[in-house]
Amino acid sequence: MSTLIRSVIYAAMAVLLLGALVLAASRVPPLQAQQAASAAAGTVVMPQYDAARNLRLPSGYREWVLVGTSLGLSYAPAGQSSHQTFNATLMEPSAYRHFLQTGQFREGTMLALIVQGIGTNQLPAREGQFASDIHGVEMAVKDKARAPEGWAYYGFGSPTGSGGIRESAAPQPKASCFDCHAQHAARDNVFTQFYGLLQKP
């Protein structure tokens, strides 16, 4: 093989190698993109209100972090609860991360309570119970700019009720929820005594 042919082959191989390196580099996100993605993952989410200052139901609340579950838990006097339900409490992820880091519920913390019925006799299960259809969605929000007491509580209705789940809700009267939370909550108006996943292992 002549020297000229070898030179041409080597040059072609170098061009191919350079092209492969350029292509590989183009598939790696630049540092700025990586930092932006990282920042987006740590974005602080705050409650949003409509023109009447009613809380908007966050669109992705079902994707929040599960912090507690209960069965038949009721704040009504013994024997006065109408029926038992499964309850799942979810916490907005950026507030959850803040709590893990600091042990504090920051301003803007949102907790969603999803109330579900109790299902039984559903094949292939032979015994036991499971959380079935949703009966209601409620939310607790720490926002002193909206509620001077610090926390406010909202009910968004039920899928089977009149109007279904509402897109926004006004805060409940202070005597309906706040006073009970202030008196009995283990930590900053939150019933952490019921939320084992918010307690240190």
Image (spheres, rainbow, N blue to C red):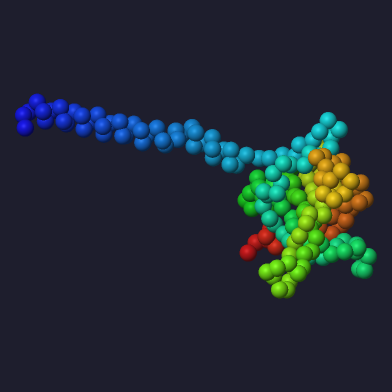
The residue sitting at the left extreme is: 2
Could you say which quadrant of the image residue 15 lies in?
top left
Q: Which quadrant, please, contains the N terminus?
A: top left
**Residue lying furthest bottom:** 127
Q: How many marks?
A: 0
Residue in the image at 49% along x and 33% along y: 33
* Image vertical order of residue 81 relative to residue 127, above or below: above
Q: Residue at x 76, y 50 (%)?
A: 112
Q: Residue at x 83, y 42 (%)?
A: 166
Q: Position of residue 90 (x, y in %)?
A: 72, 53
Residue 73 shows in this picture: no
Of the pair 67 and 167, the residue shown nearer to us:
167
Q: Position of residue 137 (x, y in %)?
A: 80, 50
Q: Residue furthest front?
A: 123
Q: Quadrant of the C terminus?
A: bottom right
Residue 54 picture quarter: top right
| In-front residue for pair 1/199 | 1
> Residue 56 sits in which quadrant?
top right
Give the percent coordinates (x, y) of residue 114: 77, 54
Residue 25 is left or right of residue 38, and the answer is left
Please name the residue shown 42% across and 36% down the image.
Answer: 28
Is residue 81 in view from this perspective?
yes
